[in-house]
Image (cartoon, rainbow, N blue to C red):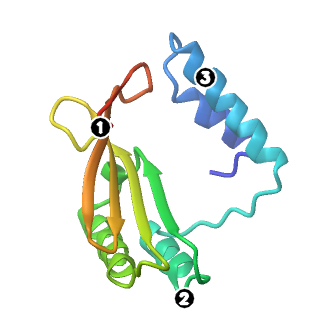
Amino acid sequence: IDVADPEQATSLLAFIWPDQEARWTRARNAIDLAATAGLDLSAMRASEWLEHELAGRPHNGSTRVVAHSFMWHYMPEEEQAKCADVIEQAGAAATSQNPFDHVSLEHWGEKHSELHLQTWPGDERRVLAHAQAHGAWVNWKLS
């Protein structure tokens, strides 16, 4: 969706339930920011984007982070598998000088959404929080 196009931005806002004014306001603010920030939007599969962005070696001393929220279940299983593979490959290539993190807020849990952090090297996975899908509440699990 190209939010710089007013018709497409309006279509996107139409998906927000009318009683959720706070969500509508957040979305409107995000659309306004994206439309004025000069973003370069490209249409491609998530796995293609990941492959492109994670290609090559990271700058020495930098941490690469892939973050996403509430998009995983919209992808076909084949695309999910491809994305997971690209993420795992990036994790396997991580070093202590160039770590790799995967942050995801998705409906991973049975009753609620979960904020996960997976870090490499070491392939450690932690649940950082349980959350209501639309941000009404967050229950942090930090210790």
Residue 58: image location, x then y, percent? 56, 82
Q: Which residue is mark 2?
A: 57
Q: Is residue 4 left or right of residue 99?
A: right
Q: Residue at x 39, y 20 (%)?
A: 137
First in sequence: mark 2 vs mark 1: 2
- Picture quarter containing residue 108? top left
User: For the residue labelled by badge 3, is the local secondary structure a helix, a strand or a loop?
Assistant: helix
Q: Which residue is mark 1?
A: 143
Identify the image quadrant of the C terminus. Answer: top left
CB of mark 3 within 8 Å of CB of mark 1?
no
User: For the residue labelled by badge 1, is the local secondary structure a helix, a strand or a loop?
Assistant: loop
CB of mark 2 within 8 Å of CB of mark 1?
no
CB of mark 2 within 8 Å of CB of mark 3?
no
Q: Amino acid at mark 2?
A: Arg
Residue 4 visible within the image: no
Q: Residue at x 39, y 79 (%)?
A: 90
Q: Amino acid at mark 1?
A: Ser
* Mark 3 surroundings: few (<14), some (14-19) or many (≥20) residues within 10 A: some
Q: Nearer the viewer, residue 100 or 7?
A: 100
- Picture quarter containing residue 7? top right
Q: Nearer the viewer, residue 1 or 52?
A: 52
Q: Which residue is mark 3?
A: 24
Estimate the spatial distance between the alpha carbons at disc 3 and disc 1, rounded to whole Å.
33 Å
Residue 11: mark in rendering: none
User: For the residue labelled by badge 2, is the local secondary structure a helix, a strand or a loop?
Assistant: loop
Estimate the spatial distance between the alpha carbons at disc 2 and disc 3, rounded to whole Å.
39 Å
All told, the count of numbered labels is: 3
Task: Choose mark 3 or mark 1, whichever is in front.
Answer: 1
Q: Is residue 39 left or right of residue 54?
A: right
Classify 8 as above or below 68: above
Residue 68 visible within the image: yes
Residue 101: image location, x then y, percent? 42, 64
